[in-house]
Image (cartoon, rainbow, N blue to C red):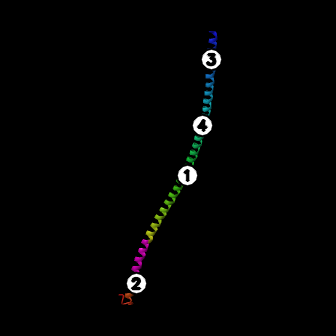
Amino acid sequence: NLLEKIRRLDQELEDSRSAFSKLEDKTRDINEKLSKAESLNRSLQDDIDKSQNEQDEATVAVNAALQEAREESQKNAEKLNCAIKENESLNKALANATEENQQVTERLSNLEAENISLKCSIGERKEIC
């Protein structure tokens, strides 16, 4: 009876050792998987950080390009406004010159008529009169 109890306890001890060994193997496997997962997480975080930095750099570059484009557009708008004002000034000068030309043309026509009248009065060119 005692011998049987000892054998049974020995068997239970052997079973416990076997189960403990299996648990140690599983623990090692889990620790290896956990280590791989942590390594993968670090790698993914590094990739995320790198992508974020690249995105930040791209955003800075785009904002700089937009600012440059705005400044260039502003300069072009100012140049266009100056050109419009100059064009308006030239149009006024052209209108004034056109009016002055009409006045000169009228004076010339009047002078030609007066010249013809004077020539008629002094007897030249009877055919014109």
Task: Where is residue 114? Give x, y as percent.
Answer: 39, 82
Q: Which mark is residue 40?
A: 4
- Name the amino acid type tagged 3: Gln
Q: Is residue 16 left or right of residue 76?
A: right
Would you name the residue on which mark 3 appears? 11
Would you name the residue on which mark 2 appears? 115
Counting residues from the start of the chain, the first of labels 4 and 3 encountered is: 3
Counting residues from the start of the chain, the first of labels 2 and 4 encountered is: 4
Element at label 4: helix
Tell whether label 3 touches label 4 (CB within 8 Å): no
Q: Residue at x 62, y 17 (%)?
A: 11
> Dot 1 surroundings within 10 Å: few (below 14), some, or many (20 or more)?
few
Element at label 1: helix
Q: Looking at the rendering, in which quadrant would you find the C terminus? A: bottom left
Counting residues from the start of the chain, the first of labels 2 and 3 encountered is: 3
Q: Can you tell which of label 4 and label 3 is closer to the viewer?
A: 3
Counting residues from the start of the chain, the first of labels 1 and 2 encountered is: 1
CA–CA distance between discs 1 and 3?
79 Å
Q: Can you tell which of label 4 and label 1 is closer to the viewer?
A: 4
Task: Where is residue 66? Give x, y as percent.
Answer: 53, 51
- Name the amino acid type tagged 1: Ala
Specify whether residue 88 is painted magenta.
Answer: no
- Name the amino acid type tagged 2: Asn
Would you name the residue on which mark 1 appears? 65
Give the extent of the magenta segment. Answer: 98-113
Q: Quadrant of residue 23?
A: top right
